[in-house]
Amino acid sequence: MIIGIVGLGLIGGSLGLDFRSQGHRVLGVSRKPETCERAVARGVADEASVSRSLLRQADVVFVCTPLGVMETTVDEILPYLSADAVLTDVGSVKGWVMQAIAPKWANFVGGHPMAGTAESGIEAAQRELFINCAYVLTPVATTPLSAVQRVEELARSLQSHVYICSPDEHDRAVAWISHLPVMVSASLITACVSEADQSVLELAKKLASSGFRDTSRVGGGNPELGVMMAKYNQEALLRSLYAYREQLDRAIDQIEQADWATLDHHLQATQHQRPSFMR
Amino acid sequence: MIIGIVGLGLIGGSLGLDFRSQGHRVLGVSRKPETCERAVARGVADEASVSRSLLRQADVVFVCTPLGVMETTVDEILPYLSADAVLTDVGSVKGWVMQAIAPKWANFVGGHPMAGTAESGIEAAQRELFINCAYVLTPVATTPLSAVQRVEELARSLQSHVYICSPDEHDRAVAWISHLPVMVSASLITACVSEADQSVLELAKKLASSGFRDTSRVGGGNPELGVMMAKYNQEALLRSLYAYREQLDRAIDQIEQADWATLDHHLQATQHQRPSFMR
């Protein structure tokens, strides 16, 4: 198969490495000539170019640019795609993507490979990044089954776990387990640094260990990603945030009322519930 | 030195292993005969007994029982201590401990070795648990300097980083970096499971990965510890929770208003601030 990849960062680059190792021919497109050079040197693509006309030969094209430029990227590449090419993306929000992109190209399949590292860019690309990760596909009523099957087959070839659901189900699910944790975790950091007593704040910084480190990790991550989640998944994220605030208020209330039995019941429940989220 | 340890769980047991390996004589006291047997068999103590009279010979006694029974434990052992014995504890809250225990014994030094594992009990005790961990001491105006120095010397011998501060500073600092994260993290779990649409909840459980895993970890931990933190550090924890709710409300407001510039500024700040909490 000939696979086009537009946007040669961590995700696009890692897809290229895996697809090439399976014997597919990979054509890479990036805005930056130096990224194209690195992509070929690192074995991410057989050929790479700043010219979108390279995609004319592609059977499947993965759009791996950030959500904020995805629509522009798609508009720019569409004139070069062969009529039966399958187009897919890797964006972390699907409702907005399906609304914006699906009307433009019949053979478009929304996708979300849920893999990542703390690093980004072509140098962070790695083989086997997607093994055992979830890979969500979000076809809509108009999406041809053959296009879904083609992307699904490629996703399975990465040894990902493929889930097929509606764009709305995807966005509500990731709001809970990916986007809400970022806001919860970032607010923890902001709250701590709001401590007005400098000696207490300095002591807190010295005493922080694994509990704080883990709870604050995603809140101290890439700000652009956090803003994109909020911007493109605003409705589902707000719904999750309101539910979270309600639960937080209950915990505060239990502590204010010294209702230790209810707090204990609550913490027993969370200890019991958490493992159901661990694959 | 002869060191008494009352309560032979993870912390008491680990202290015993390290002190014995340094050549001190360790006397262990537990309510359970089988724990005493295991303590000697595992090399946690040279001698162990359910009888508190074993502590008569001790120069320093570590009280390693849970906060909920600490006062009773101290009342029970005081009649057996030699007049110049130094008494210390390992409780995770210090204001309440200093109020409850310091008036009972002049040579009492509040302490908090900040180490732990997910396990508990004598079988979880391990050598070198305290290396590079913080060990906080919270003397008050009446605490003899000689007693502080004796405990400090032992804490340093574990290769811990010793910090000396007031009980109030300790409690406010741990509220931020240890107790608040538990409530923040537990509320995340409760909020997620409040999702009424079962297909979305099931999908969320399947898609949850490292971000959710890390942010929810301490909220899915030992419920007893969570309740103890709230009960004995109620005031400082509530203060932290109010500050947290304020920051959460600001994030919600930014997202409601689609104020992406301010949200970006906020997430840039947390990315920048988090490393100051990482030793």
Image (cartoon, coloured by chain):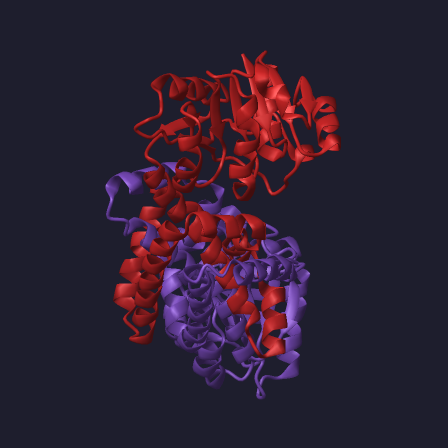
Chain colours: A purple, B red
Nearest the eye: B66 or A72:
B66
* Visible residue check, residue A66: yes
Q: Residue at x 50, y 62 (%)?
A: B188
Please give left or right for residue A32 compared with residue B120 in the image.
left
* x and y, in percent, of residue B172 in the image: 35, 45
Residue reaching furthest to the bottom: A142
> The N terminus of chain B lies in which quarter of the figure?
top right
Q: Position of residue B183 (x, y in %)?
A: 47, 56
Give coordinates of residue A107: x percent, y percent. Answer: 56, 81
Q: Position of residue A215 (x, y in %)?
A: 46, 52
The image quarter containing residue A264 is: bottom right
Q: Compare residues B193 and A21 and report the one nearer the observer.
A: B193
In the depicted view, which residue is nearer to us: B81 or B151? B81
Identify the residue at horizontal 37%, vertical 74% (top origin).
Answer: A72
B110, above or below A89, in the image: above
Confirm whether residue A32 shows in the render.
no
Kindly identify the residue that appears in the image at 53 percent across and 38 percent down: B70
Q: Quadrant of residue B268?
A: bottom left
Quarter assignment of residue A68: bottom left
Q: Is residue A272 left or right of residue A226?
A: right
Quarter of the image where the C terminus of chain B is located: top left
Query: In the drawing, does residue B264 fall left or right of residue A63?
Result: left
Q: Nearer the viewer, residue B22 or B146?
A: B146
Q: How many marks?
A: 0
